[in-house]
Amino acid sequence: MIHYYKNLLLTLSEIKGHPALLVHALTGCPFHCYQCFNYKELIESKHEQFYSIDDVINYIERQKDLFEYIVFSGGEFLNASLEDLTRDLQSIKDITDKPIIVYTNGIYLEKMKQLFENGLVDGYHIDMKLPYHLLCEDDLDLVELTLGIKVQDLSIFKRLAKAIAYVIESDKGYSKIRSVKYPFLSESAFNENRLFVKVLNVKNDKNVPYEINDFVAEQSH
């Protein structure tokens, strides 16, 4: 069973120009990105109280006139099992036709495909933390600094690049590619990301936006 953070947010900042309901799942994350501002509260903290999917559905039914989109975030929402994800998303699809957007780092490509192709997710906002397609063995220290993980080879980044390509080629108008403006990255990194997205958009006759978000440091407690 997926546990959800007991603070559902109505927001105008997640989907530009559209009110959205932001739902954080307490599903952990395989990464520990540089000064992640959600890490302490949503991943390290133990939550004895939480929402179930039934609580989320009750909120959606009560407040359905206040938002146009439903957004799932984490941590990494897709860290949950495919069975649990399918059950919870289907439960929401059974009561509303509002588009469902999932925020993801792209590591779970097969889950992304199955959920999208089964009509349970309408779009992904996927992170592109680094120009994955250009990384080499000399960049492993940069990888560890950015994503908080140690890797022995670059296979994970081939998978992340494939996930971005999938999001673009399958887009139905709801997806987005996102980067964080980490203070140690040069402008050239974002230029390479932007070019990568542009080439894929042209190849697939799509117009998926690329967005660079300001870096927000974790809060000390």
Image (cartoon, rainbow, N blue to C red):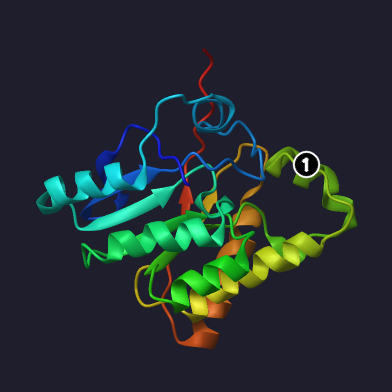
Q: Eyeballing the image, is 104 above or below 215?
A: below
Q: Eyeballing the image, is 148 above or below 186?
A: above
Q: Position of residue 155 (x, y in %)?
A: 81, 64
Find numbered disc 1 in the image and state the secondary structure of the residue it sits on: helix
Q: Eyeballing the image, is 7 above or below 123?
A: above
Q: Residue furthest left?
A: 65
Q: Position of residue 67 (x, y in %)?
A: 18, 52
Write down the quadrant of residue 22 in the picture.
top left
Write down the quadrant of residue 172 in the picture.
bottom left
Q: Position of residue 77 (x, y in %)?
A: 50, 50
Q: Which residue is mark 1?
A: 144
Count of all numbered marks drawn on residues in the image: 1
Give, as a three-letter code, the residue at label 1. Answer: Glu
One can see residue 67 in this view: yes
**Horizontal side, residue 3 vs residue 181: left or right:** left
Residue that appears at 28% across and 38% down: 9
